[in-house]
Image (spheres, helix red, strand yellow):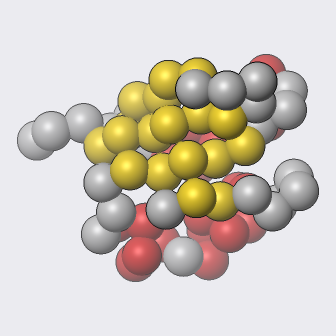
Amino acid sequence: MKIDVEGCECEVLAGGKQTVEQTRFLIIEAHTAEALADIQSQLGAHWKSKQIGASDYLFTRNSK
């Protein structure tokens, strides 16, 4: 799933918890280190991230 909502990523993640729980991969745009940290905090420790573009990050769910 790709999320690009101009700074409202955490709000989208919070509102779509059930969908995110069923998703294995997310691509989310984060323009600042603070935005990335907020997204990582919202997703939780069971997600890891990798930068794949200037401001795009691929989040993958850690295997259980």
Residue sitting at x 38%, y 50%? 25
Screen quadrant of the C terminus = top left
Instruction: Name which quarter of the figure residue 13 lies in.
Output: bottom right
Q: Is residue 7 above or below residue 55?
A: below
Looking at the image, can residue 31 be seen?
Answer: yes
Residue sitting at x 87%, y 53%? 7
Looking at the image, can residue 34 be seen?
Answer: no
Residue sitting at x 74%, y 58%? 4
Nearest the eye: 6 or 14:
6
Q: Is residue 53 above or below residue 24?
A: above
Q: Position of residue 43 (x, y in %)?
A: 50, 48
Residue furthest out toward the front:
53
Q: Position of residue 6 (x, y in %)?
A: 88, 56
Q: Is residue 64 left or right of residue 17?
A: left
Q: Is residue 62 left or right of residue 9?
A: left
Residue sitting at x 34%, y 63%? 23
